[in-house]
Image (spheres, helix red, strand yellow):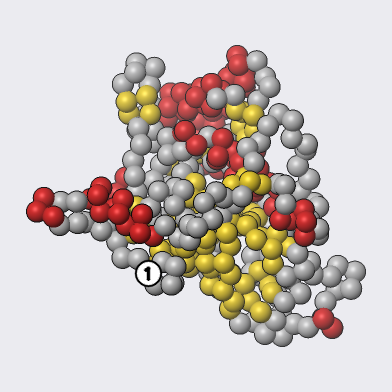
């Protein structure tokens, strides 16, 4: 895998005279494993390195049962079986070692989002591969009891693959594995854990799960949310209207289109840029990305009804910013 990646980079970045520029962004499908140091602690409070494999989540459908946020999967068979498709090409072994910042950027009842402070691409012998890099990233980590929500969100990114980097954020993979909470503490799940730990300190009425599912969604880092704006940027409403129209054409609805889930697009200097196409057919780059895809799903609504609902949502979002800004554009 590493050889083919390097060959692709070399052929793509060959310069006149035979020189090669080995500064290349990895593609969204390139990472097979992520290695995290410091996310988990052993019972003595020492950092433990975790390696999680990439998982291809099933694409959500209208036939999916309701997601239950309060069920912990304790069956190892269920944990490793049928819920997802295995990644094809098991000979691929491209690993990225991630370092996360200590404090989360955002915390909700479903997940915690951490900025990635460093991402190092490793070869099969765990040595860094020079020249391969990733854009600024964040890691969205599901809470112990809400793994299904993150799995659903990962499936929605897969469903919306064609508009990643245009309408929604770029997703660099969904990674999941089981962890034994009798032996490990996952810091976002138990930030106030006391050490040393032992079975004598466990709650006998709620013992640690030995087969807890740890899921992480790796996404490009975006700018600030629309909820922080002090004025309404020119063209914001028109862009958001066109973006939701695209989602409707893909038979998708978003049920939480508030300012916290509309983020400014990343700085073009920090990553790839992608252009959309307006009604006129002329290409341009949207200034916004829609996130929060755990509240996004395939729609069985009539297209006009779905479009009307989401258009009303973005109009209300812009009106809220306008009112907060004292009527300033």
Which is more toward the observer, 76 or 281?
76
Could you say which quadrant of the image residue 211 lies in? bottom right
Report x, y in % for residue 8.
31, 50
Q: Residues within 10 Å of mark 1 (few under 14, many from 20)?
A: some
Residue at which label 1 appears: 128
Which is more toward the observer, 110 or 24?
24
The residue lying at 72 percent from left, 47 percent from top is 82
From the viewer's perspective, tell me whether residue 189 is left or right of residue 199: left
Which is more toward the observer, 107 or 145?
145
Report x, y in % for residue 214.
66, 60
Could you say which quadrant of the image residue 248 lies in? top right
Above/below status of 57 relative to 99: above
The residue lying at 39 percent from left, 72 percent from top is 127
From the viewer's perspective, tell me whether residue 86 is left or right of residue 64: left
- Could one spot residue 288 in this view of the protein? no
Total tally of numbered discs in the picture: 1
The residue lying at 61 percent from left, 28 percent from top is 253
- Could one spot residue 17 in this view of the protein? yes
Q: Quadrant of the N terminus?
A: bottom left
The residue lying at 65 percent from left, 15 percent from top is 302
Above/below status of 170 relative to 298: below
Above/below status of 221 relative to 66: below
Of all residues, the one furthest to the left in this rendering is 17
Report x, y in % for residue 68.
78, 45
Could you say which quadrant of the image residue 159 lies in? top right
User: Element type at marker 1?
Assistant: loop
Report x, y in % for residue 165.
42, 39
Q: Quadrant of the C terminus?
A: top left
Which is more toward the observer, 308 or 66?
66
């Amino acid at each position: 895998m590493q050889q083919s990646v390097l060959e692709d980079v070399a052929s793509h970045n060959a310069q006149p005279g035979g020189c090669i520029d080995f500064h290349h962004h990895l593609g969204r499908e390139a990472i097979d494993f992520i290695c995290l140091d410091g996310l988990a602690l052993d019972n003595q409070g020492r950092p433990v390195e975790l390696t999680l494999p990439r998982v291809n989540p099933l694409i959500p459908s209208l036939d999916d049962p309701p997601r239950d946020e309060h069920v912990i999967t304790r069956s190892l068979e269920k944990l490793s079986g049928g819920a997802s498709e295995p990644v094809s090409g098991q000979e691929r072994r491209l690993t990225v070692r991630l370092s996360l910042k200590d404090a989360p950027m955002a915390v909700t009842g479903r997940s915690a989002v951490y900025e990635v402070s460093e991402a190092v691409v490793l070869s099969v012998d765990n040595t860094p591969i020079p020249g391969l890099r990733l854009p600024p990233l964040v890691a969205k980590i599901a809470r112990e009891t809400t793994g299904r929500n993150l799995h659903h969100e990962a499936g929605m990114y897969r469903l919306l693959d064609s508009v990643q980097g245009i309408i929604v954020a770029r997703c660099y993979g969904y990674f999941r594995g089981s962890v034994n909470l009798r032996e490990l503490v996952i810091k976002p799940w138990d930030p106030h854990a006391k050490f040393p730990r032992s079975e004598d300190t466990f709650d006998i009425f709620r013992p640690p799960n030995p087969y807890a599912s740890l899921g992480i969604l790796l996404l490009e880092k975006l700018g600030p949310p629309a909820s922080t704006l002090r004025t309404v940027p020119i063209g914001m409403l028109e862009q958001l209207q066109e973006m939701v129209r695209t989602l409707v054409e893909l038979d998708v609805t978003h049920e939480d289109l508030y300012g916290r889930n509309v983020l400014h697009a990343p700085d073009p200097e920090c990553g790839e840029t992608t252009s959309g196409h307006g009604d006129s057919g002329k290409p341009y780059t949207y200034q916004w990305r829609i996130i929060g895809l755990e509240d996004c799903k395939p729609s069985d609504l009539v297209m006009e009804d779905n479009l009307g609902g989401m258009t009303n949502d973005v109009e209300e979002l812009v009106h809220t910013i306008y009112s907060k800004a004292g009527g300033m554009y």
